Amino acid sequence: MPELSKESRRFIDDLRLYLFSSGKKEEEIREIAEELEAHLEEAERNGKPIEQVVGASPKEYMEMISNEMEFDKKAWMKYIPVIIFGAISFTIIGQLVEDMRLSYSYAILGGSALVSILFVIMIFGAFKYMAARQMSRVKEFLIILPPVFIMMTLFGALVFWDMTTDLPGFELGVMPSMIVGAVTVAILMWVSIWAKTAVLLVMLSAIHVPELLLKLTTLDVTISLIINLVAMYLIIGIYMYFSFKKMKKADAAAG
């Protein structure tokens, strides 16, 4: 049996993303994708265009399929805690690098939950927008950036408020803090494998690894700060450069 064309394969991938972002069951998504793949294979064997199967508007086709499926509440109740945990992972690692202890105000935990829920709404909205429109990987990347920057800005403001105001909270000892740190790293690795992207791990490494290494030196505080900032932006810049290069290569192959 001949393989599907790149256009058909891309449409199936986009449909999967659209349905996943709409909160549909993974098993049903897989069944729909397999059924569509069979129809597209048959159409291509008979020399018919993809439009004969899915219609002229990919967005309308995806909406029609989505409306026929139920929302998977149970699965999303599992994802939300992981996303909230991911949001505070940067401060968890940062505090462990600083003094091996974790301390949090109740305000930052509650605020992190609200910011995370807002981020989920924005990022899944972006996913649905991208999936319903055939666009380059570079454009997709640029569409994802605003929700990420908004989340980082809100979370940064939350941390600043927590640092400048005496808010009620709690503190953990060294051993419990290390256990939380190990669990955090494990969850981040799982999320990175699940999402097929190393962006979270790269960002964490860029922010904290140079700082951790500089703590082992006797350099002046100002010089250490400059080196830390340069190293952070250099690591992020290199990652973004190779990510863009990979996306452009994928677009060229698809075109």
Image (cartoon, rainbow, N blue to C red):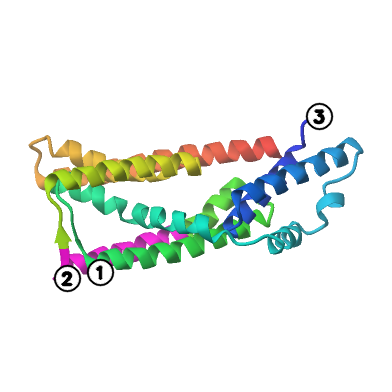
> Which amino acid type is shown beneath numbered disc 1?
Ala
Q: Position of residue 169 (x, y in %)?
A: 17, 65
Note whether 44 is above or below 26 in the view shown.
Answer: above
Q: Which mark is residue 2?
A: 3
Q: Are marks 3 and 1 in contact (CB under 8 Å)?
A: no
Q: Are marks 2 and 1 in contact (CB under 8 Å)?
A: yes
Quadrant containing the N terminus in the rendered view: top right
Residue 107 appearing in the image: yes
Residue 202 appearing in the image: no
> Which amino acid type is shown beneath numbered disc 2?
Leu
Relative side of 46 to 100, left or right:
right
What secondary structure is marked by label 2? Answer: loop
Note whether 198 is above or below 81 in the view shown.
Answer: above
The tag earlier along the polypeptide, 2 or 3, is 3
Note whether 164 is above or below 8 in the view shown.
Answer: below
* Residue underneath mark 1: 107
The magenta stretch is 147-169
The tag earlier along the polypeptide, 3 or 1, is 3
- Residues 65 and 202: in front is 65
- Secondary structure predominantly adopted by residues drawn in magenta: helix
Whole-angstrom CA distance, mark 2 to mark 3, is: 63 Å
